[in-house]
Amino acid sequence: MAIIVQIQIHKNLFLRDPEKSDLGRNIIGESIKLIDTLGFEAFTFKKLAIAIGSTEASIYRYFENKHKLLIYLISWYWGWLEFQIDYSTNSIEFAEDKLKKIIEIISEAQSYDPNVAHIDEAILNRIVVAESSKVYLTKNVIDENKEGLFVNYKSLISKIANIIKEVNASYPYPRTLASNMIETSHEQLFFAKHLNWLTDLRIDNGDLSALRNFLEHIVFSAIHANIIKSN
Amino acid sequence: MAIIVQIQIHKNLFLRDPEKSDLGRNIIGESIKLIDTLGFEAFTFKKLAIAIGSTEASIYRYFENKHKLLIYLISWYWGWLEFQIDYSTNSIEFAEDKLKKIIEIISEAQSYDPNVAHIDEAILNRIVVAESSKVYLTKNVIDENKEGLFVNYKSLISKIANIIKEVNASYPYPRTLASNMIETSHEQLFFAKHLNWLTDLRIDNGDLSALRNFLEHIVFSAIHANIIKSN
DNA sequence: CATTGATGAAAGTATTACTATTAATTTTTA
DNA sequence: TAAAAATTAATAGTAATACTTTCATCAATG
């Protein structure tokens, strides 16, 4: 019996559920590839329509605009990350080991998951690194947040923050550290690849251990430090 | 005798130097206000032209496109930050105190600097928080970097990294920590303002001490931690 | 077999991101 | 101070983007 993983996506992110039709799954699958190759700015529904042999109008029946499609993709990734964390930490006894596992998952080059045939997680990971902050760095954050479009991110951060609290119940910044872990991993990976004088991390042929070491260093030194409030 | 601060901006960022004409200074001054109110996506040269009572064509004689204008503004900010760091740390004896000063500067709501009448640093600071990562999160990073468009960021990070090395010469991640400080301060400030369940930091009526405390906590606990390479 | 729903095809609109041309105005310099 | 050069404004134009609308076709469902 195969396990089917269904990542929940907030219904305000789409007009018609793309998981429920061939065209929909095609839109998802090809948009990932196209955004990866063109970058989000140059990506258009027109180009996507041509790539999947459909029309702009048909894609607009699934997604209001390309921004919501991007949030959909990134949300899927957040949901998938949370699932992976759940799945691989539930058998771990010590909170500290759980946190190490989380860092491992975050800083891992994602590989193809046969459970979701039309989504290539490795490519999606590259999109997340390069595009995810564009999801919220807009003038509509507040409204989009109220609409619930970022629930998956919220949920992921809560999960990680709770494990941080398990490690050190009196740690004053569990959420800050959790969101910082995620964002730092994206940034530093991007810097290492494209602007390497901004970082000491050297990431060659898919070996992400330098990133993992840095994240462990930052997270554990923070969690175990004695907090002295200056002023 | 007044001190005139001249921030150096790489010449590839503009077609005609905006500092050298009224129209140019107007473009800079108004673009800051417009990007702040509209957000970078909705900001256009057309709207800017109307705002300053000029024409699109005239603005295009100064800047190739709005992306380069954004890099110009952000570069100005990076240069200004570096100047402030230089200026306010050169009389400080201990490296650790210098680093504390840097954190203070980074996490400070910037106030109006009468030396540069047409640039409102407080508004520019908001733009930096919301838009700076869009400067490099594009498909052209590599080329734009080769053109030298990010020298000011590079220089700023080097300066901070050197002070980190002064504090602990054997610290293995001076650049990573330096870029992480800057990026984290933007992100967490943005989260605190717009998506506050992503952080524990509470920033009300311009009191940024929570941000400063967190940055000090992260930076100093990292710098003074014993580095244990896992694996 | 009649209806509903999904998709495709085609056309249309407002806006964006530019470029080009010419004319008016200001600045430089001889 | 007049002529030349540079700058800016005004206007128009183009290709692409980000959609919307309408209508026809086809498949599924009841």
Image (cartoon, coloured by chain):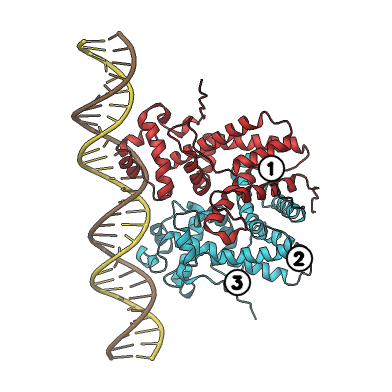
Chain colours: A cyan, B red, C brown, D yellow
- Marks 3 and 2, the one that precedes in the sequence: 2
Q: Which chain letter matches label 2?
A: A
Q: Are marks 3 and 2 in contact (CB under 8 Å)?
A: no
Specify whether B9 is left or right of D5.
Answer: right
Say which of marks 3 and 2 sits in front.
Answer: 2
In the rendered image, which quarter is residue C11 located in? bottom left
Q: Position of residue B48 (x, y in %)?
A: 35, 42
Q: Position of residue A182 (x, y in %)?
A: 63, 57
Q: Residues within 10 Å of mark 2 (few under 14, many from 20)?
A: some
Which type of secondary structure does the marked residue at label 2 adopt? helix
Q: Position of residue A25 (x, y in %)?
A: 48, 69
- Marks 1 and 2, the one that precedes in the sequence: 2
Q: Which mark is residue A95?
A: 2
Say which of marks 1 and 3 sits in front.
Answer: 1
The reply to whether residue A29 is visible in this rendering is no
Q: Position of residue B178 (x, y in %)?
A: 65, 42
The reply to whether residue A197 is visible in this rendering is yes
Which of A216 and B189 lies nearest the eye of the viewer? B189
Q: Residue at x 36, y 63 (%)?
A: A56
Amino acid carrying mark 2 in the image? Ala
Amino acid carrying mark 3 in the image? Asn
Q: Which mark is residue A200?
A: 1
Which of B182 and A130 lies nearest the eye of the viewer? B182
- Marks 1 and 3, the one that precedes in the sequence: 3
Amino acid carrying mark 1 in the image? Asp
Specify whether B87 is left or right of A58.
Answer: right
Labels 1 and 2 positioned on one and the same chain: yes
Q: Residue at x 61, y 55 (%)?
A: B201
Q: Which mark is residue A115?
A: 3
Say which of marks 1 and 2 sits in front.
Answer: 2
Labels 1 and 3 positioned on one and the same chain: yes
